[in-house]
Structures are given as structure tokens and as C-alpha cells.
Image (spheres, helix red, strand yellow):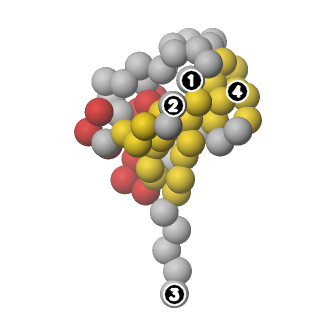
Amino acid sequence: MKLIINGKTKEYQESLTVQQLLQKLNLSPDRVVVELNRQILSPDIHVKTQLKSEDTIELVQFVGGG
């Protein structure tokens, strides 16, 4: 399955949900906003949102600072 994540193409052998993708990328779901095909996803649907080949995903991480 080919995904476009933040403008870069990545290949995965198995199908993934959004939650599984975040785990593979070592991203905490409570510190990232996921946009799938130009639609912002609510964190409560990450577990049931199945990704498809050619999906475009933008991941924005929250960064603390002072």
C-alpha cells in the first residue's frame, strides 16, 4: 500500500488504520492532528479509519515551548 505522508511517499506491506500508522511512526495520538485527504480526523475515529493506497495524509505535531 502506498501512502503519501507529509508530501513523501511511503510503502507499507499491510493495510493499516490511522491508529496503526501513528504507532508505526512512533507518534502519540494526543499530540498530533491527522488530516486524511484534506479532511481533519477526530482522534476518536483513528482506530476505525482504514487507510487505502494513494491516501494523502498530513500529520501536524503539537510542540510545547516557552
> Distance of mark 2 from mark 4, alpha carbons?
15 Å
- Per the image, the residue denoted by label 4 is 10
Of tags 2 and 4, which is closer to the observer? 2
- Per the image, the residue denoted by label 3 is 66
Callout 1: helix, strand or loop?
loop
Q: Mark 3 or mark 2: which comes first in sequence?
A: 2
Q: Mark 4 or mark 3: which comes first in sequence?
A: 4
> Distance of mark 4 from mark 1, alpha carbons?
11 Å
53, above or below 24, in the image: above
> Distance of mark 4 from mark 3, alpha carbons?
34 Å
Q: Mark 1 or mark 2: which comes first in sequence?
A: 2
Residue at point 44%, 30% (across, down)? 18
Q: Are marks 1 and 3 in contact (CB under 8 Å)?
A: no
Residue at point 50%, 37% (across, down)? 38
Amino acid found under the numbered disc labelled 1: Asp
**Crowdedness of circle 1 by 10 Å Cα count: few (<14), some, many (20+)?**
some
Q: Are marks 1 and 2 in contact (CB under 8 Å)?
A: yes
Residue at point 36%, 24% (across, down)? 49
- State which quadrant residue 14 falls in: top right
Residue at point 41%, 19% (across, down)? 50
Callout 2: helix, strand or loop?
loop
- Per the image, the residue denoted by label 1 is 55
On residue 37, the disc is 2
